[in-house]
Amino acid sequence: MIGKYHGTDLMIDVIGDDYRMLQVISRFGITLGFGDQTVAETCKSAGVDLETFLTIVNYLKDIHAPINKLVEHVNLRAIMLYLTNSHTYFVDYKLPAVRRKLIEAIDCSARNQIAFLILKFYDEYAEDVSRHMEYENKHVHPHVENLLRGKLTSESFNTVVNQHSRNHASIEKSISELKNIIIKYYPSDANAQLLNDVLMDIYMVEEDLLTHCHLEDTLFAACVRKLEEEVRKHGGEVVAENQQDKDVRINSTEELSEREKEVIRLVAMGLANKEIAEKMFIAVNTVMTHRRNISRKLEIHSPAGLTIYAIVNGLIRLEDVKL
Ligand SMILES: [Fe+2]
Ligand SMILES: [Fe+2]
């Protein structure tokens, strides 16, 4: 096994070396109380595949290690269980826990519109993450299960992954936006200690999610592609084409134009693209181009985020905001 940790190491020493391994242990379904057992002994008594466990902990220790060497040691069912348990951790535990802290830290009464919008932004973000992870549980993992049974489906792994309603890049971008919005725009009436505490939590969720997505994009994807290749060699059926989104570049300066400010104002008032087009006497496609440019310039993508921006920058009065 390549990497820092080995089966002969004591589990307690692995945790002592890097406390993030506590999360890995729990996501593999290993409970605490393993005394002075080695990693191999702990995995054996918990019924966890040792090679996969070691691959993950070594991968987390050095996420830039060459994947092709690690792929050989991974049991796909074991890594899928690890990923599914991670999804449960994020969706059912961590994101609701951060939400509760956020409510405590910011004044969410009806008087504080910014707090209300930040919470709305957070809820939209958490909803995106939940949808993404549910998609993986319901579509990506069953696709791999089929491959493990030697069956190809009409779509390739790449196609299934690319059908995500929200991809990893947008999930990562949203949490970083949320953090920045709180830091830049939250009024000073918040409880500073609680707000700092929740920000620290958001930073930790961000790091944890980044690692999770990276693991899926690299190690997990490499293992699945290798298996898919093997199944195909042994007489698979149809393979769908991989559709890559084209990156459309639009030239514009970083300052918002008057038209873009108007679009933000109308978004904050709760108007849909079609209604904005009618109000501004422009085509819906033009509205969409404006929105893409606005998102790129401000690095804010959701209506709730744009609304917060509109309020703090005086583009709209609070009473005109559609909550
Ligand atoms: Fe995932
Ligand atoms: Fe994912």
Image (tube, rainbow, N blue to C red):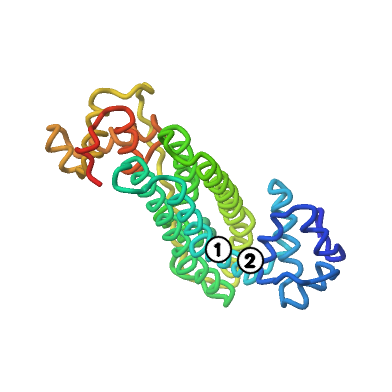
Of the pair 127 and 165, the residue shown nearer to us: 127
Count neighbours of disc 1 (C-alpha within 10 A) and say few if under 14, some if 14 to 19, many if 20 or more: some
Q: Is residue 94 visible?
A: yes
- Point out residue 75 in the picture as x, y percentages from the top left corner: 68, 69
Is label 2 in contact with label 1 (beta carbons under 8 Å)?
Answer: yes
The residue lying at 62 percent from left, 66 percent from top is: 82
Q: Is residue 99 above or below residue 186?
A: below
The residue lying at 43 percent from left, 37 percent from top is: 181
Q: Is residue 139 above or below residue 218?
A: below
Helix, strand or loop at disc 1?
A: helix
Q: Amino acid at mark 1?
A: Tyr
Q: Is residue 70 left or right of residue 173?
A: right
**Disc 1 designates what residue?**
89
Of the pair 186 and 110, the residue shown nearer to us: 110
Q: Is residue 286 visible?
A: no
The residue lying at 75 percent from left, 55 percent from top is: 58
Count neighbours of disc 2 (C-alpha within 10 A) and say few if under 14, some if 14 to 19, many if 20 or more: some
Q: Earlier in the sequence, mark 2 or mark 1?
A: 2
Q: Is residue 323 left or right of residue 247?
A: left
**Disc 2 designates what residue?**
27
Numbered circles on residues, count:
2
Q: Answer with the quarter of the image where residue 1 lies.
A: bottom right
- Per the model, the C-alpha gap separating discs 2 and 1 is 8 Å
